[in-house]
Amino acid sequence: MNDLNRVSSRLSEEAFLANKGLSNEVGIHVFCYDPKDELTVRTFFESLKKKTDVPYRLIECDLYKIFLQICEEKHILKTIPNMEERKGKEYLSEQLQKVATPEAFVEKMKYEPHNKGDILLITGVGKVYPFMRSHKILDNIQHIFSDIPVLMLYPGTFNGQDLGLFGKFLDGHYYRAFNLL
């Protein structure tokens, strides 16, 4: 993936780290990639997280791990397979969306203080679908992380308005983000 070669230098840019978007909007960025490159992208970002000779620090929030944590704390994680078997996928999805709300996800993502050079890295978008949609997370974090850049790794496409997960599903409309590259 040629785009990965450009990512580290983009994350190191002073303007990016200062979180200055067009018209001084909140710096929410999307890095789109082909879903077949998931393991390559994941490995690449794991190596970036370990780097110490860069002006940034990646703070990862894996949406799937957060989802599991929410379900565990609500004492429902072990009941999910049985619920799906008894009542069906649609019922299960409705029930989980009542528990694992965008606000619950954001609460798990919060940390203080935000330091200069921090970048909130959102991963696990594909793993948590359809229980949580990425545009709902982005809608709910912009006021909390307005002082640091946010980077969402996205297995699909983003055209500046629509997020297309896996190249198959319209994940939602979100116009406040920028393509990373």
Image: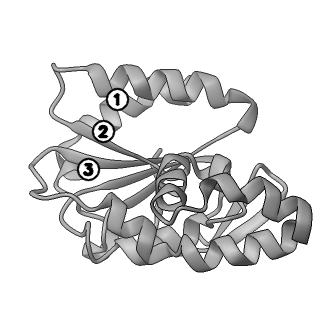
Using the image as rendered, state which of residue 91 and residue 13 is in the foreground.
91
Q: Secondary structure at mark 2?
A: helix
Q: Which residue is mark 2?
A: 11
Residue 46, compared with residue 109, is above or below; it is above
Residue 177, compared with residue 122, is above or below; it is below
Residue 136 in which image quadrant: bottom right
Label drawn at residue 16: 3
Q: How many numbered markers are drawn? A: 3
Q: Which residue is mark 1?
A: 8
- Residue 40, position in %: x, y? 59, 22
Contact between marks 3 and 2 (CB within 8 A): the answer is yes
Residue type at the position of mark 1: Ser
Question: Callout 1: 10 Å neighbours few (<14), some, many (20+)?
Answer: some
For the point 70% across and 76% down, which residue is it?
95
Task: Return the disc, 3 or 1, that comes first in the chain's sequence.
Answer: 1
Q: Cα distance, mark 3 to mark 1?
A: 11 Å
Using the image as rendered, state which of residue 93 and residue 28 is in the foreground.
93
Question: Callout 3: 10 Å neighbours few (<14), some, many (20+)?
Answer: some
Q: Secondary structure at mark 3?
A: helix
Residue type at the position of mark 3: Phe
- Residue 121, position in %: x, y? 38, 46
Using the image as rendered, state which of residue 157 and residue 69 is in the foreground.
69
- Residue 133, position in %: x, y? 62, 67
Task: Return the disc, 3 or 2, that comes first in the chain's sequence.
Answer: 2
Contact between marks 1 and 2 (CB within 8 A): the answer is yes
Residue type at the position of mark 2: Leu
